[in-house]
Image: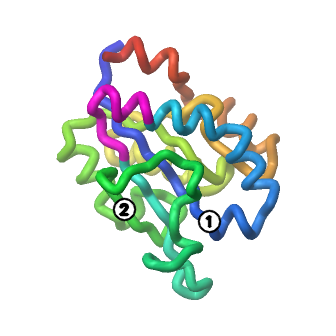
Amino acid sequence: MEMKPALIVLDIQNIWLTQKPELKQSVDMRIDVINGAIAWFRRNKRPIIVVCHEDREMGVVPGTKGFEVYEAVAIDKTDLRITKQYPSGFGKTGLEELVHKLGCDSVVITGLSASQCVLGTYFGAWEGHIHPYLLKGGIASHSEDHVVTAEEICETITLEALNKTV
């Protein structure tokens, strides 16, 4: 299966992890898979797009500690950045255009939260004719049931399967 994927690192921000300890625990359980995907995309010279949620009412804005990506996530300043205000990373952000401009036909989504922004972004990708995959073992939630459900209803891909795409 040949594909030209981009990685979306979604909403793994300090604010959400400090508000819900269960969410931080869920991310920490999956950090090796998340960072493994980041390393795979970097090694294969595929785009990494970091998408962060902005909420002005809560004070979650660029430049604040809460807005920043959790330090355990192996992102780099050279990774592309998108700021969103809606559950979907594709909602009025220019992400769809960016993915197409980068020559990608698919996205692999890692991050949080499984039952909210992950699903919103997954289904938003389809609207832009972009094939979405959830990274198996790479999405987090305050509820493990939500992770299981998201991985059951959405198409997933493993790190091992990604190796067969290049």
Q: Nearer the viewer, residue 166 or 43?
A: 43
Q: Nearer the viewer, residue 131 or 112?
A: 112
Residue sitting at 34 percent across and 34 percent down?
A: 42
Q: Residues within 10 Å of mark 1 (few under 14, many from 20)?
A: some
Q: What segment carries the magenta color?
A: 39-48
Asked whether residue 123 is in view, the answer is: no
Q: Position of residue 151 (x, y in %)?
A: 66, 33
Q: Is residue 132 left or right of residue 119?
A: left
**Is 8 part of what is drawn in magenta?**
no
Say which of marks 1 and 2 sits in front: 1
Answer above or below: position of 109 versus 71.
above
The disc labelled 2 sits on which kind of residue? Ile
Amino acid bearing label 1: Asn
Q: Is residue 44 magenta?
A: yes
Residue 79 image position (x, y, % from top left) = 33, 51
Task: Residue at 21%, 43% (x, y): give it.
Answer: 102
Classify mark 2: helix, strand or loop: strand
User: Can you identify the residue that label 2 sits on?
Assistant: 82
